[in-house]
Image (tube, rainbow, N blue to C red):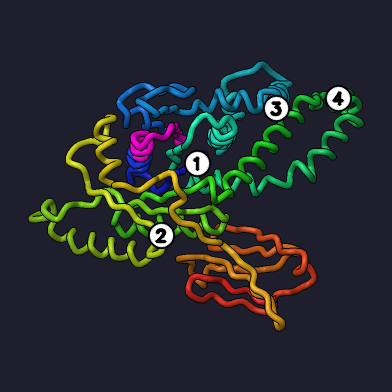
């Protein structure tokens, strides 16, 4: 089974491109499901039909769904949420304000990502296509599993043991209810799913991310930042889709000044993403809003290509050894040398690019080695040990 995620700046047409891709895959005979992690659901609008929280048949081989994050959240952390509600209402009755406090930023979107894992585990489809939220939200979600992966190993066993030993006394003295085992079970369940989700997302033979952009300079810059950050976290971007290209005949008269800007943008995309497959779609004459139009757009955009294949794959970092030294090469396309910060923390390399930070675990034979120098050349950070 393959998982393909479409991401990009808001307004570039991710939903339309993802929906057209799903129609193309279904038309080619593969069973495909498309879902959205964006809270502002518009997937149903693209197909011009109602979609539910569980898979709905759209057409032959094609199914779709819009995630109900409240429903998914209740499945994932009902006991933990109930405990936190009890803590917040010790001195008073429950209220709508308490329910609002229990909606943590990013958590509902994370439960939507859990649905990716659930669908993959069931293996009922050949392909899962995901219409992601805008770039910033998607990057935040993709960083969750790695940032919290050590929590269950280091903190949870201690907390569970402490609650069992000191819990009864604490309840009497402080009048605060201690968490029961089912609360810790919820936390372990969430953390386990996070780890499994991370392992799935980093499997480059299964998961691909595809960036949707337009030929405008400001959008291209966002696509480049997106590409760099995804590489920093070791995700595989295997295609760039350039949407909303104005036909030459439409840019006469009032829009004539846009011809040069669009050509410059298209040239920049070609030069910047030269190694990666690129697909181009002209601005359509009407709305991309029903199954027949989506099929037409899918054929126009991807022609005879098999979208279920991994279209491009490149190692994010490699380690090269010689008698004199060891060099770690990290691919950071479009990164600015002035925004790089590098340090060594025990058995890890801590690398920051602007406001994004990633930890790279070192192999065992480099545990006792120290960094002797680093250079940034042609998009690669070369670290010497």
Q: Report the Cα–Cα distance between label 1 and label 3.
A: 33 Å
Residue at the image point whose x is 21% and y is 42% from the top: 284
Do tag 4 and tag 3 residues touch (Cβ < 8 Å)? no
The residue to which callout 2 is attached is 276
Where is residue 317 drawn, in percent x and y?
A: 59, 64
Q: Report the Cα–Cα distance between label 4 and label 1.
A: 49 Å
Q: Under tag 2, what secondary structure?
A: loop
Foreground of the two, 380 or 21? 21
Do tag 1 and tag 3 residues touch (Cβ < 8 Å)? no
The residue to which callout 4 is attached is 171
The residue to which callout 1 is attached is 2
Any part of residue 19 in sight: no
Residue at the image point whose x is 76% and y is 24% from the top: 182
Q: Residues within 10 Å of mark 2 (few under 14, many from 20)?
A: some
Q: Under tag 1, what secondary structure?
A: strand
**Is residue 30 a member of the stretch shown in magenta?**
yes
Q: Report the Cα–Cα distance between label 2 and label 3.
A: 44 Å
Do tag 4 and tag 1 residues touch (Cβ < 8 Å)? no
Residue at the image point whose x is 34% and y is 42% from the top: 17
Where is residue 216 drawn, in percent x and y?
A: 29, 56
**The C terminus lies in which quarter of the figure?**
bottom right
Q: Quadrant of residue 251?
A: bottom left
In front: mark 4 or mark 2?
A: 2
In front: mark 4 or mark 1?
A: 1
In front: mark 2 or mark 3?
A: 2
Any part of residue 84 in sight: yes
User: Is 178 situated above or below 104?
Assistant: above
Q: Report the Cα–Cα distance between label 4 and label 2.
A: 59 Å
Q: Under tag 4, what secondary structure?
A: helix
Q: Earlier in the sequence, mark 1 or mark 3?
A: 1
The residue to which callout 3 is attached is 80
Label of residue 350 in the image: none
């Amino acid at each position: 089974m393959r998982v393909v995620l479409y991401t990009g700046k808001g307004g570039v047409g991710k939903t339309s491109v993802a929906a057209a891709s799903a129609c193309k895959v279904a038309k080619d005979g593969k069973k495909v499901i498309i879902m959205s992690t964006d809270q502002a659901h518009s997937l149903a609008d693209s197909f011009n039909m109602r979609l539910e929280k569980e898979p709905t048949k759209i057409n032959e081989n094609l199914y779709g769904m819009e995630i109900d994050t409240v429903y998914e959240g209740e499945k994932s952390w009902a006991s933990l949420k109930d405990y936190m509600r009890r803590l917040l209402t010790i001195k008073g009755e429950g209220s709508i304000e308490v329910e609002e406090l229990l909606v943590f930023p990013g958590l509902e979107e994370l439960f939507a990502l859990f649905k990716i894992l659930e669908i993959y585990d069931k293996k009922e489809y050949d392909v899962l296509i995901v219409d992601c939220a805008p770039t910033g939200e998607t990057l935040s979600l993709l960083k969750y599993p790695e940032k919290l992966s050590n929590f269950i190993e280091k903190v949870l066993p201690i907390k569970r043991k402490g609650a069992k030993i000191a819990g009864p006394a604490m309840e009497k003295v402080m009048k605060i209810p201690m968490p029961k085992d089912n609360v810790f079970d919820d936390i372990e369940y969430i953390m386990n799913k996070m780890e499994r989700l991370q392992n799935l997302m980093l499997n480059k033979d299964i998961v691909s991310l595809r960036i949707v952009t337009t030929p405008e300079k400001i959008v291209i810059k966002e696509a480049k930042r997106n590409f760099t950050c995804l590489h920093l976290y070791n995700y595989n971007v295997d295609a760039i889709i350039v949407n909303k290209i104005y036909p030459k005949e439409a840019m006469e008269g009032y829009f004539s000044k846009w011809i040069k800007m669009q050509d410059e943008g298209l040239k920049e995309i070609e030069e910047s993403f030269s190694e990666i497959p690129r697909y181009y779609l002209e601005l359509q004459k009407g709305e991309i809003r029903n199954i027949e139009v989506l099929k037409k757009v899918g054929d126009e955009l991807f022609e005879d290509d098999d979208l279920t294949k991994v279209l491009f794959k490149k190692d994010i970092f490699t380690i090269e050894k010689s008698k004199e030294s060891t060099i770690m090469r990290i691919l950071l396309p479009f990164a600015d040398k002035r925004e790089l910060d590098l340090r060594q923390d025990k058995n890890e390399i801590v690398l920051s690019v602007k406001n994004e930070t990633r930890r790279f675990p070192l192999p065992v034979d480099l545990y006792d080695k120290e960094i002797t120098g680093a250079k940034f050349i042609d998009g690669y950070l070369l670290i010497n040990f």
